[in-house]
Image (cartoon, grey):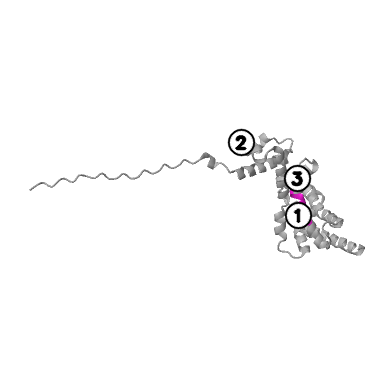
Amino acid sequence: MPTPPKKTATAQPKPPRQPAQPKPSKRASRPDGAATRQLLLETAGQLFAERGFADATSKEICERAGTPMASVNYHFGSREALYEAALIEAHRQVVGLDELAALVASFADPRERLRALLGRFVGFSTDAGTPWGFMLMLREVLSPSNAIPALIEKAIRPKAAFLLKTIGEVLELNPSTPVVQRALMFSVLPCIVMMVAPMRMQAALLPAVAKDREALAEDFVRFVMAGLDAIALAHRTDS
């Protein structure tokens, strides 16, 4: 009988080669632009608060932040623009407009809104921990720079308008009247004094004030509200 032909072994197809995994990019591990900008802002703010604008150089800011030397100019354009941004951030740390709006959003009565705002101001002024923003603002107040106009327009004026509107509603007067503007000054300046006066000085001179901060806030609100009532009565009588 004829011998059947031998079966030839068929070659098994090789599995497809897996594409090489791309190596992680060094660029991807770096903080993105927004994070770097925020890091520079925080670092510069702390340095400006410690030593002032004149003595805090771009080189030192970048070294402390761990960023390339050109980072200040790249993200802000100049050291002056960085200082302006730090001042605006400093004012936000002291009191932010969004924070104020959220604080009073649930109150329909303007008097209750003002009570909440005053309580917040006293609370901040008596906090043990002070952010760098307050120290930077204090430096700027004592030695104003060329950034003051930008600070007023971008940070202070919007909050002042918010507070003037609230006090105007309490007094039932137009916020633009001199009476309301004076009332705002009388209401806010004591909080600024409490922020500036060192806690050790307050405790030495007025120990009762230093011990009971909650009572301080309550009495301050009563004091301001009574003063506003007297102002409102006087000007209603005059008219």
In percent of width and height, residue 189 lies at: 81, 52
Q: Determine contact: label 1, label 3, CB under 8 Å.
A: no
Between label 2 and label 3, give the one nearer the viewer.
3
Q: Is residue 174 left or right of residue 87?
A: right
| Pointer 1 or 3: first along the chain | 1
What's the amino acid at mark 3?
Ala
- What residue is drawn where x is 80% and y is 53%? 188
In percent of width and height, residue 179 lies at: 86, 57
- What residue is drawn where x is 77% and y is 63%? 110
Query: How many residues crowd around disc 1 within 10 Å: few (fewer than 14), some, or many (20 or more)?
Result: many
Determine which residue is flagged by label 2: 68
Q: Say which quadrant the C terminus sits in.
A: bottom right
Q: Determine contact: label 1, label 2, CB under 8 Å.
A: no
Determine which residue is flagged by label 3: 150
Residue 199 seen from this side: no
Mark sitting on residue 121: 1
Q: Secondary structure at mark 1?
A: helix
Query: How many residues crowd around disc 2 within 10 Å: few (fewer than 14), some, or many (20 or more)?
Result: few
| Pointer 2 or 3: first along the chain | 2
In percent of width and height, residue 4 lies at: 13, 47
Q: Is residue 197 left or right of residue 46?
A: right
- The CA span between labels 1 and 3 is 23 Å
Q: Is residue 3 left or right of residue 109?
A: left
Mark sitting on residue 221: none
The reply to whether the magenta stretch includes residue 159 is: yes
Query: What is the count of numbered marks?
Result: 3
Query: Relative to 73, is 98 above or below?
Result: below
